Image: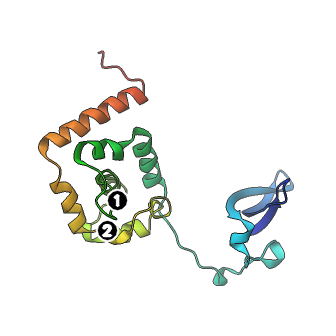
Amino acid sequence: MVFFTIKTDRKGNEYVFAEERGWVGGKVKRTFQKYLGPREKFADVPVGRKHALAPEDCTVKPFEFGISAAMWALARELDLPRIIDAVIGGKQGLHPSAGEYLTLAAINRVADPCSKTQMSDWFLGDWLSTHVPVDPAVLNAQTYWNYFQRLAPEDYEAVELELAKRVQAYYHLTWDL
């Protein structure tokens, strides 16, 4: 069973953790721990095993995590959104930049391909919605086509060339055969 615990640092600040304990080598040990945040964010959360919530009292919102998190991390390491923005331009109003939007669209195509009209639903059920500040309402077919219409054939080549240079430098690759 997972329960919440409070830990206090040397300055007296309290932090909430989700923990699970189990038998390991004949002793009770912590088998899982996840930092959740400062105590003030969890004023109504019962703490300790005596106050554990019953499963029927909990609301769980599952998120897809693995592939989209890995792809977003790689896109950020290679600076893919900025590369695209440098070629075709950046932000337009409240929407994400072209690089951010096209990177999200590419991740969608790999992680869980869906129609452009369903991208906002995919995004809301994915880990990216908790880490990428994008209004899901803009993840729609019209915005998708607006961004892709800005890409000329020579833009694809420019993005590919710059991305290849980044991959070569980042992974210390050589073109020698």
Q: Where is residue 29 in the image (x, y as percent from the top left)?
A: 82, 56
Write down the residue under mark 2: 138
User: Going 36% across and 27% down the picture, which residue do you hit?
Assistant: 168
Quadrant into which the C terminus falls: top left
In the figure, residue 114 lies in which quadrant? bottom left
Q: Residue at x 30, y 61 (%)?
A: 113
Image quadrant in which the N terminus is located? bottom right
**Residue 149 appearing in the image:** yes
Quarter occupied by residue 31? bottom right
Q: What residue type is labelled 1?
A: Pro
Answer with left or right where residue 50 lies relative to residue 33: right
As rendered, which of 142 and 91 lies closer to the eye? 91
Q: Is residue 78 above or below residue 64?
A: above
Image coordinates of residue 32 in percent, x first then y, are 71, 57
Mark 1 touches mark 2? (CB < 8 Å): yes
- The percent position of residue 165, horizontal first and vertical second, equals 32, 29
Depth check: 74 or 31 in front?
Answer: 74
Disc 1 from disc 2: Cα separation:
8 Å
Q: Residue 96 carries which label?
A: 1
Q: Can residue 1 be seen in this view?
A: no
User: Callout 2: 10 Å neighbours few (<14), some, many (20+)?
Assistant: some
- Residue type, numbered disc 2: Val
Residue 26 occupies quadrant: bottom right
In this view, the residue farthest toward the top is 176
Q: In this view, does 52 lie to the left or right of 86?
A: right
Q: Residue furthest bottom?
A: 56
Disc 1 packing (10 Å; few <14; some 14–19; many ≥20): many
Q: Name the residue at 33% across, 53% down.
A: 110
